[in-house]
């Protein structure tokens, strides 16, 4: 009997003014880290605002395989019963990270210091993503991790005596930094990570919230092993990367006004906010506050005419996940937008530079691609068909592009949107999108 695989496709249509107040799902990066540190802590941690996405659920499932009890009393809540720094239990079963690159890279650091062997695997997309950037510096600490020519699966050998190192990242990466810091919890001596450009400091802030002594500043973090994590409650802010699609949509659709509630505003995450303002966007931050060590605020975005810019390279590390949305904003802008220094985009869930360039050209755009960026000429978009290549951020970005296109935009292969933004279709249509399952 022949097997049929169903695939989720979308069609996005031209929209009128977007209106409404909405809360996007919880921050994925914070959700991953809260699970991991809660698992290694002494006591019980309550997580509220947890992202109910496939990536974060995969991390929870891995921790449960390692002997951590994690309860889900309600949607968006987790109760993690910590087992302590040395309380994880080994398993011969494969630890499936699904599509979660953050989950796999951070778990590699966490598992490097355990007494037991582990094997981390992922889906087809994750299995193509480079891991040497994590495994090489971990090896300097004494970890033994086997890869398939630098790609997953990762076979982590237990029982290794880790030593703290001082390591300067060749490429700025919050995931690599976090993996080294998690390994540093188990290492003798001091572990220091120095970055060429400051990256997101979620791990540092959360380690401090869980009571681990850590010294950090933009571009540098340092800790020593031998301490204890203490359970704490975590309120996860709304994910800025998810809010990004609505910031762009509200900026480019005439007559729009959207309020995005309780969005995480970590300065290492909000490069897109600065970029859009440089382009002329009308975005205000209101009700600023702090939650669990993270800055939070409401974002009010109104339609405004955008103009092209030469993106300052200093913003690139702080918006690496938001470039697909920025490319759509650039198409709606007058003039050219130039992006350089973004070669990291070629090794995300897809080659995002190539995938966005190909997709935009299919809609009639003029875009010149270079190895580390692109030049995008603003102008009208036509309808057409787009391949997302299973990349959730590509799919959502073209859903936004369809709002201003002169014809329907069909987006193929949207299943992976659930990895980071469950309920996107309903939330988008609730504020004025015309987005349908094809």
Image (spheres, rainbow, N blue to C red):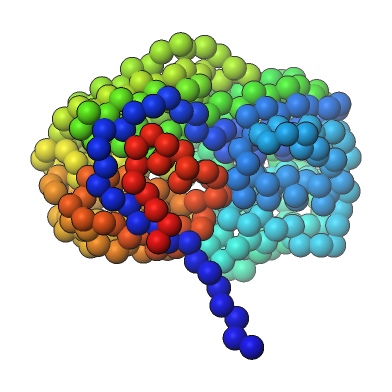
- Residue at the far bottom in the pictured view: 1
Q: At which x and y percent is residue 4?
A: 56, 77
Q: Quadrant of the N terminus?
A: bottom right
Confirm whether residue 317 shows in the render: no
The residue lying toward the viewer, choosing from 93 and 51, is: 51
Which residue shows up at 55% across the image and 45% down it? 422
Residue at 73%, 45% (x, y): give it: 60
The part of the image, by quadrant, that contains residue 164 is top right
Query: In the image, 206: left or right of 64?
Result: left
Give the mark count: 0
Front residue of this view, candidates 65 and 261: 261
Q: Nearer the viewer, residue 405 or 142?
A: 405
Farthest-out residue, left:
335
Q: Is residue 126 visible?
A: yes
Quadrant housing the C terminus:
bottom left
Residue 205 placed where, x, y %?
Answer: 61, 23
């Amino acid at each position: 009997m022949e097997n049929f695989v169903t695939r989720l496709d979308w069609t996005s249509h031209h929209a009128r003014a977007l209106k409404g107040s909405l809360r996007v799902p919880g921050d994925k990066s914070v959700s991953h880290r809260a699970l991991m540190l809660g698992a290694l802590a002494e006591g019980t941690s309550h997580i509220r605002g947890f992202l109910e996405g496939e990536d974060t659920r995969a991390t929870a499932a891995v921790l449960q395989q390692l002997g951590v009890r994690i309860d889900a009393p309600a949607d968006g809540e987790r109760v993690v019963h910590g087992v302590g720094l040395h309380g994880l239990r080994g398993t011969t079963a494969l630890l499936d990270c699904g599509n979660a690159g953050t989950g796999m890279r951070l778990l590699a650091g966490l598992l490097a210091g355990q007494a037991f062997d582990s094997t981390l695997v992922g889906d087809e997309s994750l299995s193509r993503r480079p891991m040497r950037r994590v495994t090489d510096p971990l090896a300097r600490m004494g970890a033994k991790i086997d890869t398939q020519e630098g790609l997953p699966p990762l076979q982590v050998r237990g029982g290794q005596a880790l030593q703290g190192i001082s390591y300067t990242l060749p490429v700025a990466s919050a995931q690599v930094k976090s993996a080294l810091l998690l390994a540093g919890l188990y290492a003798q001596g001091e572990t220091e990570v120095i970055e060429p450009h400051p990256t997101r400091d979620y791990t540092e802030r959360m380690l401090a919230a869980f009571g681990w002594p850590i010294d950090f500043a933009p571009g540098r973090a340092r800790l020593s092993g031998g301490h204890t994590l203490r359970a704490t409650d975590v309120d996860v802010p709304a994910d800025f990367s998810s809010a990004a699609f609505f910031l762009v949509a509200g900026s480019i659709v005439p007559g729009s006004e959207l309020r995005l509630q309780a969005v995480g505003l970590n300065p290492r995450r909000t490069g897109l906010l600065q970029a859009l303002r440089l382009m002329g966007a009308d975005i205000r931050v209101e009700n600023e506050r702090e939650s669990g060590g993270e800055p939070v605020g409401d974002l009010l975005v109104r339609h405004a005419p955008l103009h092209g810019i030469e993106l300052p390279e200093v913003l690139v590390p702080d918006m690496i996940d938001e470039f697909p949305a920025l490319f759509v904003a650039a198409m709606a802008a007058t003039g050219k937008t130039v992006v350089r220094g973004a070669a990291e985009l070629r090794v995300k869930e897809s080659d995002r530079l190539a995938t966005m360039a190909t997709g935009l050209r299919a809609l009639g755009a003029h875009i010149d691609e270079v190895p580390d960026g692109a030049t995008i000429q603003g102008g009208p978009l036509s309808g057409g068909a787009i391949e997302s290549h299973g990349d959730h951020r590509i799919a959502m970005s073209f859903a936004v592009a369809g709002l201003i296109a002169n014809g329907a935009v069909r987006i193929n292969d949207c299943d992976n949107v659930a990895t980071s933004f469950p309920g996107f279709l309903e939330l988008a249509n609730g504020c004025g999108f015309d987005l349908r399952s094809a």
